[in-house]
Image (cartoon, grey):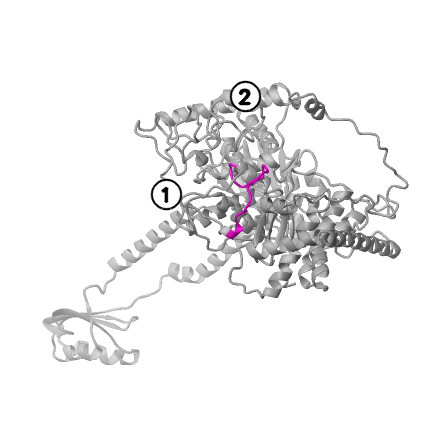
């Protein structure tokens, strides 16, 4: 029942009640009479000051009209009075009326009508029967939603004017955008597809880790589709009452069919779509009944032409197979964490309305946030803006982004924690051990930052950032991570002769890696290329359920022995590296105690001359049965082109031409809509959005790096929408190249020295006017950056002109939000 309908019914009921009250007041025979005590009325009878008297026998009332006016409660003009008398005094009152000498008196006896008596008896029965009939009718489907509307669909309808999210707001998921844009194109231009006998996918499932943009993609489809869009959560189908979920499914699809073509989006469909037979209620489980109804509505006996179902989930593995088959979910689209180019695009999308300082380089930030999802990257920029506001700054600096990244990964720093000098020294050697172990072995990334500042649950950490997005790891690379993890424990044993509880998180991480190498990746020659540990239990009865492991106790003992051997060997390698470079370890610890944070330039100055070792013999007899043939593998076309000094060959794309044609059509539609919007606006000065340069001409238009088709062709990328079309586009005002601006937030502070003619940017504020977050001097590197992952756009330190550091500093170790390798010391475990 809608809100308008409820208000309409309430207004009708109120009007009826007012009418009844007005009728009763107007027809009341006692109007105009003043209520007095019985003694006053009897006195008037005795004084013979009465003109007319009416005795209401049933009500036991006297209505008296006086000859002479009297005073009652301060009113001197009372001519009509009314009073009550007891039933036993009826004869006495009648005698007094007779003796009062009244000109006229009468007795009124009220009798109940037959209709009124019947109504009084039958009204309760009719009300109860009507309510029961109403409930039974709605429970049987005669009314929408069942009793009280609990079975009515809770889907929220969005029309064309509601959503403000489009595909321009989606970055880092070009393949998913392309698949969904095809559905939008089919709904808006069905003729091209119908000529080929093609049918639109009846169901689209978006699956992937949390925070990757599945719901954002659905909102973008709602903003682009131009058809009714219904959004609902999977948990809205689950209720305490049996049959409510199925009723809501029926009501949802009934409404959708009435408004077809349309799109239904079910978020977190795993709440209702998990495998049948796994519930605790048997075949009559409410969730199973809801799923059965959903299966029938998606592809049952009745046709649902024109209704497209979209759904999102983090757990596609627990969905029912009948739900995933073609005809229900014809298209399953993975939405994973973005790669380097995708992360840069996402950062640019979320930096649209944020004023970025000239020292910000989003490309380097994308390199340092490997493994982060789109939600994590958005949080990084938001935290940087909050830090800037905390110090009353007006620009977001590179230091603010550096601190925000650490806050997202590890939480805010604990500046109030008091640490003894001995514990600080142990922490410094622990983190130095991690850093030196990573620097002293091959097949692992060099440490980007090491700190002994407490943050979150950790007392310090060392972070190794991968140079690129890796999809697989070799046996040597995984073993190098074991050495990296055991570096802190080895440093404590080497320097102090006794380990501490600070290595507990390192040991846990190393155990996970070693067990995965043995049981999942088949890297142990003793156990072979076999996956161990698959459980057969109920996945919803708890983690692992009551299932049994599919290997014998003897194999379990072998697995434990192999894991222990791996960790012990990594421990020995880490200890030997630290003992062989004790001077470097002491130097690192001394510098950490002095500066508390060391970054890549300072680490290169200390450890640059270190020659890493390679560990080839990880398992005993690992190459005995399957030795390596030392002939060199073939080279890729890109490697051959680089050897010849040529440009790498273009990557073939089967859908490239169709994709570009669809992009051009969509761009033309956008330009037409924008032109129509501009015509409807006054021809005054263009409105200035925060963080955006002033637009030329009239009207307000969104910033779009693809507005120049020639520039898009020069970019050489096939990204559809969102973010920046190229990873490193020309026209960066920070390095003086010509062309369109990289992003309004980055050009808001003026061009560089060699900027060529192009879009006009606001002038650079005077020196000292830009204020932003700045890390303390002791956390700044003493040496210049020499690598391309520098946090600043010029690969060197640029003072932001402001100060203020409420809680800047260290980062977290746990790589739950990021795939960057980091080790920590946590003395609280």
Please provide percent x and percent y for residue 488.
69, 56
- Residue 260 lies in the magenta-colored region: no
Please provide percent x and percent y for residue 335.
62, 38
Assess disc 1: are there few (<14), some (14-19) or many (≥20) residues with their C-alpha within 10 Å of its C-alpha.
Answer: some
Magenta residues, as a range? 778-794
Q: Is residue 471 left or right of residue 161?
A: right
Q: Residue at x 78, y 26 (%)?
A: 634
367 versus 485 height, above or below? above
Assess disc 2: are there few (<14), some (14-19) or many (≥20) residues with their C-alpha within 10 Å of its C-alpha.
Answer: few
Q: Is residue 102 left or right of residue 194?
A: left
174 versus 315 height, above or below? above
Q: Is residue 255 visible?
A: no
Main SS, magenta region, reads loop
Residue found farthest to the left: 68
- In the rendered structure, find residue 769 and report the number of the disc placed on it: 1
Q: Residue at x 16, y 74 (%)?
A: 73
As measured in the structure, the alpha-carbon distance from the residue carrying label 2 to the one carrying label 1 is 39 Å
676 versus 2 height, above or below? above
Which residue is the site of mark 2?
713
């Amino acid at each position: 029942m809608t809100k308008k309908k409820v208000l309409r019914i309430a207004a009708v009921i109120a009007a009826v009640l007012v009418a009844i009250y007005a009728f009763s007041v107007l027809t009341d025979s006692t109007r105009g009479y003043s209520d007095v005590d019985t003694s006053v009325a009897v006195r008037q009878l005795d004084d013979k000051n009465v003109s007319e008297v009416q005795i209401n026998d049933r009500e036991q009332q006297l209505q008296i009209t006086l000859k002479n006016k009297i005073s009652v409660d301060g009113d001197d003009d009372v001519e009509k009075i009314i009073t009550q008398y007891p039933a036993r005094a009826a004869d006495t009152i009648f005698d007094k009326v007779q003796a009062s000498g009244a000109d006229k008196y009468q007795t009124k006896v009220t009798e109940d009508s037959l209709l009124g008596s019947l109504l009084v008896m039958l009204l309760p029965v009719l009300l109860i029967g009507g309510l029961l009939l109403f409930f039974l009718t709605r429970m049987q489907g005669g009314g929408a939603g069942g009793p009280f509307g609990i079975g009515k669909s809770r889907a929220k309808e969005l029309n064309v004017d509601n959503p403000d999210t489009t595909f321009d707001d989606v970055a880092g998921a070009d393949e998913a955008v392309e698949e969904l844009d095809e559905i939008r194109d089919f709904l808006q231009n069905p003729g091209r597809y119908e000529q080929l006998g093609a049918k639109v996918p009846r169901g689209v499932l978006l699956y992937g880790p949390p925070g990757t943009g599945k719901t954002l993609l659905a909102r973008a489809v709602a903003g682009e589709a131009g058809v009714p869009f219904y959004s609902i959560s999977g948990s809205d189908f689950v209720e305490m009452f049996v049959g409510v979920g199925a009723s809501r499914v029926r009501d949802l699809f009934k409404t959708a069919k009435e408004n077809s073509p349309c799109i239904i989006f079910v978020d977190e469909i795993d709440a209702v779509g998990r495998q049948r037979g796994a519930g605790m209620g048997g075949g009559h489980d409410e969730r199973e009944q809801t799923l059965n109804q959903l299966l029938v509505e998606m592809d049952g006996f009745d046709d649902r032409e024109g209704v497209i179902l979209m759904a999102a989930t983090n757990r596609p593995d627990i969905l029912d197979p009948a739900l995933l088959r073609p005809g229900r979910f014809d298209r399953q689209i993975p939405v994973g964490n973005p790669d380097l180019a995708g992360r840069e695009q996402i950062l640019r999308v979320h930096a649209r309305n944020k004023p970025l300082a000239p020292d910000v380089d989003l490309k380097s930030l994308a390199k340092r946030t490997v493994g982060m999802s789109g939600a994590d990257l958005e949080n990084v920029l938001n935290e940087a803006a909050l830090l800037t506001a905390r110090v009353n700054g007006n620009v977001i600096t590179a230091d603010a982004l550096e601190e925000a990244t650490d806050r997202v990964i590890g939480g805010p720093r604990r500046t109030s924690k008091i640490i003894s000098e001995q514990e600080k020294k142990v922490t410094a050697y622990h983190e130095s051990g991690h850093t030196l172990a990573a620097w002293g072995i091959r097949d692992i990334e060099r440490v980007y930052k090491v700190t002994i500042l407490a943050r979150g649950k950790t007392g310090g950490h060392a972070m190794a950032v991968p140079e690129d997005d890796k999809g697989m790891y070799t046996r040597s690379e995984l073993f190098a991570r074991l050495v990296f993890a055991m570096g802190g424990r080895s440093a404590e044993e080497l320097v102090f002769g006794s380990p501490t509880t600070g290595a507990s998180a390192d040991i846990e991480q190393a155990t996970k890696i070693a067990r995965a190498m043995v049981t999942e990746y088949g890297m142990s020659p003793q156990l072979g290329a076999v996956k161990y540990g698959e459980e057969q239990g109920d996945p919803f009865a708890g983690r692992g359920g009551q299932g049994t492991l599919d290997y014998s106790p003897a194999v379990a003992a072998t697995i434990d022995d192999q894991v222990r051997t791996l960790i012990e060997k990594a421990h020995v390698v880490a200890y030997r590296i630290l003992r062989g470079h004790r001077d470097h370890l002491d130097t690192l610890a001394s510098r950490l105690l002095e500066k508390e944070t060391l970054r890549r330039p300072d680490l290169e100055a200390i450890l640059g001359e270190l020659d890493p070792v390679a560990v080839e013999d990880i398992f005993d007899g690992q190459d005995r049965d399957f030795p390596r043939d030392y002939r060199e593998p073939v080279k890729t076309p890109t490697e051959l082109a680089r050897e010849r000094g040529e440009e790498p060959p273009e990557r073939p794309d089967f859908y490239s031409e169709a994709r570009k044609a669809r992009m051009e059509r969509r761009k033309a539609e956008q330009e037409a809509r924008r032109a129509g919007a501009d015509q409807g606006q006054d021809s005054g000065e263009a409105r200035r959005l925060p963080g955006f340069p002033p637009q030329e001409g009239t009207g307000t238009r969104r910033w779009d790096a693809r507005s120049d088709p020639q520039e898009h062709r020069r970019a050489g990328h096939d990204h559809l929408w969102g973010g920046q079309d190229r990873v490193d586009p020309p026209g960066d005002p920070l390095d003086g190249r010509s062309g369109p601006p990289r992003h309004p937030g980055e050009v808001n502070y003026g061009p560089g020295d060699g900027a060529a003619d192009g879009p006009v940017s606001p002038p650079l504020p005077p020196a000292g006017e830009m204020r932003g977050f700045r890390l303390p001097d002791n956390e700044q590197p003493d040496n210049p950056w020499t690598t391309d992952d520098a946090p600043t756009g010029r690969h060197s330190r640029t003072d932001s002109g402001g100060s203020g550091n409420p809680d800047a500093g260290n980062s977290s170790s746990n790589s739950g939000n990021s795939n960057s390798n980091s080790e920590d010391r946590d003395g609280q475990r």
